[in-house]
Image (cartoon, rainbow, N blue to C red):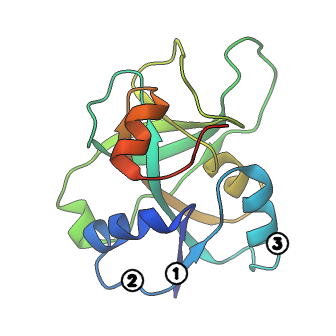
């Protein structure tokens, strides 16, 4: 059985739309610390599909993205990091949508500007992958073009300070 990971309850509607019939859903909470806590006891061979909202500098709001690789977002420095490749989503219904394929960059805060194009930004996926899970896939739906205001309207999620 696979486990569907979402950061917030508001993302359950994405699971219903793109992976209908899935019932094993785990809400991790937003961000690295919540993900680390929520997944600490999950066996590393668990099949995981991370489903959630993501920002993008140039993809249209509502674009469905199948993530091919997860990285950290650090546009101001370069240092060696492992490549965290994801597996394709094994679901015939989802495959019929012919999603855009892209890299997902995870950040510790909401990304409001970035020179990176043709990718998506979230706050959880790299931290999921970095824990050593061996069977991870991800579906992201673009909720905003690096605008917290648009994200709130689209996803009804996190609040600003």
Q: Is residue 22 left or right of residue 31?
A: left
Q: Please provide percent x and percent y for residue 157.
A: 49, 52
Q: Please provide percent x and percent y for residue 108.
A: 72, 37
- Is label 2 in contact with label 3 (beta carbons under 8 Å)? no
Q: Is residue 65 visible?
A: no
Which residue is labeled 3 in the image?
40
Residue visible at 27% across and 41% down in the picture? 63
Which residue is labeled 1 in the image?
2
Quarter of the figure with the C terminus: top right
- In three-dimensional space, the C-alpha distance between marks 1 and 2, rounded to whole angstroms, equals 9 Å
**Is 116 located above or below residue 21 in the figure?**
above
First in sequence: mark 2 vs mark 3: 2
Please tell me how crowded label 2 is: few (under 14), some (14-19), or many (20+) other residues with Cα within 10 Å: few
Please tell me how crowded label 1 is: few (under 14), some (14-19), or many (20+) other residues with Cα within 10 Å: some
Which element carries disc 1, helix, strand or loop? strand
Q: Nearer the viewer, mark 1 or mark 2?
A: 2
Which residue is labeled 2 in the image?
22
């Amino acid at each position: 059985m696979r486990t569907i990971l979402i950061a917030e309850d508001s993302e359950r509607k994405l699971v219903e739309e793109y992976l209908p019939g899935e019932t094993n859903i785990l809400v991790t909470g937003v961000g690295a610390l919540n993900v680390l806590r929520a997944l600490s006891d999950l066996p590393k061979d668990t099949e995981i599909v991370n489903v959630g909202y993501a920002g993008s500098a140039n993809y249209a709001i509502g674009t469905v993205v199948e993530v091919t690789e997860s990285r950290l977002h650090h546009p101001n420095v370069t240092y060696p990091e492992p490549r965290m490749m994801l597996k394709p989503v094994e679901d015939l219904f989802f495959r019929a949508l012919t999603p855009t394929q892209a890299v997902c960059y995870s950040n510790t805060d909401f990304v409001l500007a970035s020179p990176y194009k043709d990718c998506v930004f979230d706050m959880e996926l790299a931290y999921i992958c970095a824990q050593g899970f061996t069977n991870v896939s991800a579906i992201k739906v673009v909720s905003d073009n690096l605008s917290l205001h648009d994200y709130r309207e689209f996803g009804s999620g996190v609040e600003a300070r």
